[in-house]
Amino acid sequence: MENNAIYSTMVRAGRTTYFIDVKEAKNGSKYLSISEHRIDADSKKSRSTIRVFGESIEQFKQAIDEAATSAQQGGEEHANRKEVSVGKGRLNR
C-alpha cells in the first residue's frame, strides 16, 4: 500500500502505538488517518484505522478535545451527549 502521508506523528502507549497522519486522496482532498497498532498479551498484533475527511475534521477535533478534558476532570460530564451532523454522516456526542 502506498504511503501518501503529508504529515505523520506517532504516540506510544505501552503495547499500543497510535499513528496520526494527514493524507491526500487521489482527488486531492486531505483527510486524517488515525491508526491504532496493538500487541495483546499473546503477542497477537492488531490494527484499526479510522479516517476523518475534510468537512468533519474540525467537529472531530472539538469532540476529541471535549472528551479529553472530561477524562482529565474525572469524567464528571459523561452524561452530556451532543449530536453533530456533518454532511451525510453523523457524529454523536
Image (cartoon, rainbow, N blue to C red):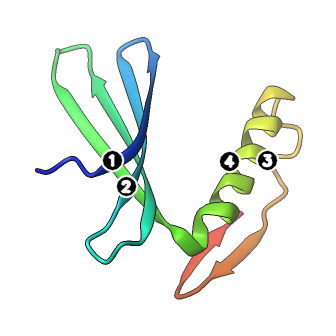
Left or right: 4 as drawn, with respect to 70: left
Give whichever of discs 1 and 2 has the lower sequence position: 1
Residue 20: x %, y % from top left: 45, 40
Give whichever of discs 1 and 3 has the lower sequence position: 1
Q: Tag on residue 79?
A: none
Disc 2 secondary structure class: strand
Callouts 1 and 2 close, C-beta under 8 Å:
yes
Viewer-proximal residue, 11 or 31?
A: 31
At 44% from the left edge and 61% from the top edge, which residue is drawn? 31
Residue 12: x %, y % from top left: 44, 17
Disc 1 secondary structure class: strand
Q: Tag on residue 5?
A: 1
At 68% from the left edge and 62% from the top edge, which residue is drawn? 58
At 72% from the left edge and 63% from the top edge, which residue is drawn? 93
Residue at mark 3? 66
Residue at mark 4? 64
